[in-house]
Amino acid sequence: MKGVKSVVALLLLVAGGQVAAQARELPDFTQLVEHQGPAVVNISTKQAVQRSALPQIPGVDDEELREFFRRFMPRRPPVEPGPRSETRSLGSGFIISEDGYILTNAHVIESADEIDVRFTDKRELKARVIGSDKRTDVALIKVDAKGLSFVKFGDPARLKVGEWVVAIGAPFGFENTVTAGIVSAKGRSLPEENLVPFIQTDVAINPGNSGGPLFNMRGEVVGINSQIYSRTGGFMGLSFAIPIDVALDVQKQLRAKGRVSRGRIGVAIQEVTKDLATSFGLEEPRGALVNSVEKGSPASRSGIESTDIILSFNGKPVESSVDLPRIVGATPPGSKVPLEVWRKGALVRLTITVGELKEERVAGAEAPPEAKPPEVTANRLGIVVSELSVDQSRELGLKHGLVVTDVRPEARVEVQRGDVLLMLAHAGKQTQLESVKQLNTLLNGLAKDAVITLQVRRGGATAFVTVAGFEDRG
């Protein structure tokens, strides 16, 4: 019996040790919040609006409605003027210097007539806008004060997926609310947000958290909480933060000149898929495939060509097409930098002088008028093509290409009538398409498991489409 008691005692001791070990592994945020909390502020804005501009919903006040429509609904056309009223919106921010500079989101202070900043010691001060950048959703504001607590910055590049992070903000106006979670992913691209490699977390973020800091466990700010993915307008486990290095670069320019200058090179690009890589003779899918080059652009002057795959820019690798706009955008206009491209199965090194950003074009899809298909046999792709006429060549500004005149139900390639096929790539070799006979000869010489890429012009844009396999279909 004594032996049994000893065994039980030993088991309890071991179990207790495991529980204690697990407890020690759980993070403790108390010191972080105590030291960094005073540097986090609540931001409220006031704006005079027409009453009739917002629909009235029983039980929902103008402030909540304004926040919802501003963040989750498309812009509406102006309405007839009505009685003017004052609306408020809430957000968060954090102090980055002892003399009162504060970072927040651009959407928090957008169109504000008045900005009030509330501190943890209950003081309230008016703030003025130093500058705002909608493309990154970063804004810099300032209050007249000295000796303020301010945050320290971390390196987002050192963040690891699965690492604990903490947000402090004012969700729904509840001041200095602390929420925690882990880093879910890094380098996320969101629609129409190709200049920011977002940090994705599962930290609870709600309206009012916008503009607040995201801390690592060392108490360093690594991001600005900016967006959520939601079907309801509330938290659903997907939150996105702007990396602090991106925000600091923006605020530096805003403080110096009130605006942000970004580089541009004048290309339209697309992602390099596995099939595209195979067609262009690239060992693995990486880089940014150039669809077209703007005439007179920095890219054109540097010698970049359509069908080039940009592998590095200014010494930084381009692993995915989404990397290129970020790297180019962060390069000061006027800089002369090196880049590497994959061209016709070989690495080519070029030098480019970066211009200043205007909207990058993307491969579009403006469909031209349909052409009546001739009654001829389709080729191995399941489509019918014809050579460009003199008028078509003049109108399109093309010296070569084949016009798609019919797309059969068994077609293997995603094209439509009116598209122009410019080039065929296979096993690292690229061939300009100039005649129907030439294309048919190329297609008929392909193995059943061949992978090819076609450069297709549609309207004013070009894109690359792949075809994998030519096994006969029954």
Image: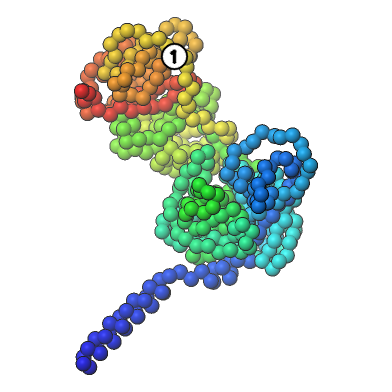
Residue occupied by mark 1: 370
Quarter of the image holding residue 285? top left
Q: Residue at point 45% right, 31% down? A: 269
Q: Position of residue 349 (x, y in %)?
A: 41, 33
Q: Amino acid at mark 1?
A: Glu
Q: Position of residue 292 (x, y in %)?
A: 46, 25
Say which of 103 and 308 sits in front. 103
Q: Residue at point 40% right, 9% down? A: 372
Left or right: residue 372 versus residue 143 is left
Element carrying mark 1: loop
Q: Residue at point 38% right, 73% down? A: 22
Q: Position of residue 151 (x, y in %)?
A: 60, 62
On the question of residue 401 being in view, the answer is no
Q: How is the image coloured?
A: rainbow
Q: Quadrant for the C terminus, please.
A: top left
- Image vertical order of residue 97 relative to residue 393, above or below: below
Left or right: residue 41 versus residue 281 is right
Q: Residue at point 66% right, 49% down? A: 58
Left or right: residue 225 versus residue 450 is right
Q: Position of residue 381 (x, y in %)?
A: 29, 20
Quarter of the image holding residue 431? top left
Label 1 crowd bin: few (<14), some (14–19), many (20+), radius 10 Å: few
Which residue is situated farthest in the front direction here?
58
Q: Quadrant for the N terminus, please.
A: bottom left
- Image vertical order of residue 394 relative to residue 116, above or below: above
Left or right: residue 404 versus residue 181 is left
Which residue is situated farthest in the right direction here?
83
On the question of residue 132 being in view, the answer is yes
Which residue is situated farthest in the bottom direction here?
2
